[in-house]
Image: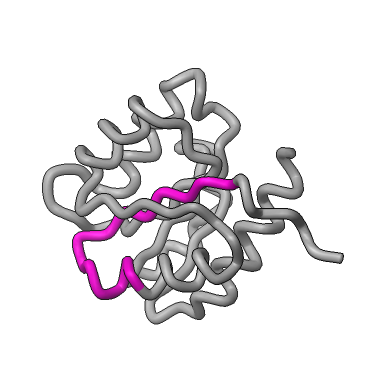
Amino acid sequence: MGIETMSYRALIVDDNVALARVTQFALDRAGFETQIAINGQVALELAQEKQFDVVITDQQMPVMSGIELCRALRALPSYFDCPLILLTAKGLELELPKLREEVGINGVFCKPFSPAAVVNEVNELLGAVV
């Protein structure tokens, strides 16, 4: 029996709406309630209005990068333990230990990535914090 995800909320942050929708579709199919933000600033505003259970963010975006967003979220008490996943085309997956320690990022996926792999990682991370 799998992890129950019906009540989980995921925030997907990417200025590439087509890519965000691919991730959204995979999470929706897995039973998540999802919302898309087009940049880090919009995401931060949404996160202050509504509690999300996981945030999946692109790294390179206008206005606020994914790493800047993750730092800002970690500064909010309600997001101290929230799983944060970074999507990048820059190969930052090699720096996950450093990003985990300095920024609090829980996972990194390099583009192109498998939406199913992201869903599996999210389920694993939520199983660890629930």
Q: Is residue 100 visible?
A: no
Residue closest to the far right: 1
> How is this picture coloured?
one colour
Q: Is residue 126 left or right of residue 15?
A: right
Q: Which residue range is magenta in the image?
A: 8-21
Which quarter of the figure has residue 71? top left
Residue occupying image coordinates x 49% and y 52%: 33
The answer to whether residue 77 is above or below residue 31 is: above
Residue occupying image coordinates x 48% and y 39%: 52
Q: 96 or 84: which is nearer to us?
A: 84
Relative image position of residue 73 (x, y in whole percent) = 40, 31
Instruction: Determine if the magenta segment contains residue 17.
Output: yes
Which quarter of the figure has residue 43? top left
Residue closest to the far top: 77
Q: Is residue 13 left or right of residue 91?
A: left
Relative image position of residue 10 (x, y in whole percent) = 48, 50
Residue occupying image coordinates x 45% and y 29%: 74
Residue closest to the far left: 63
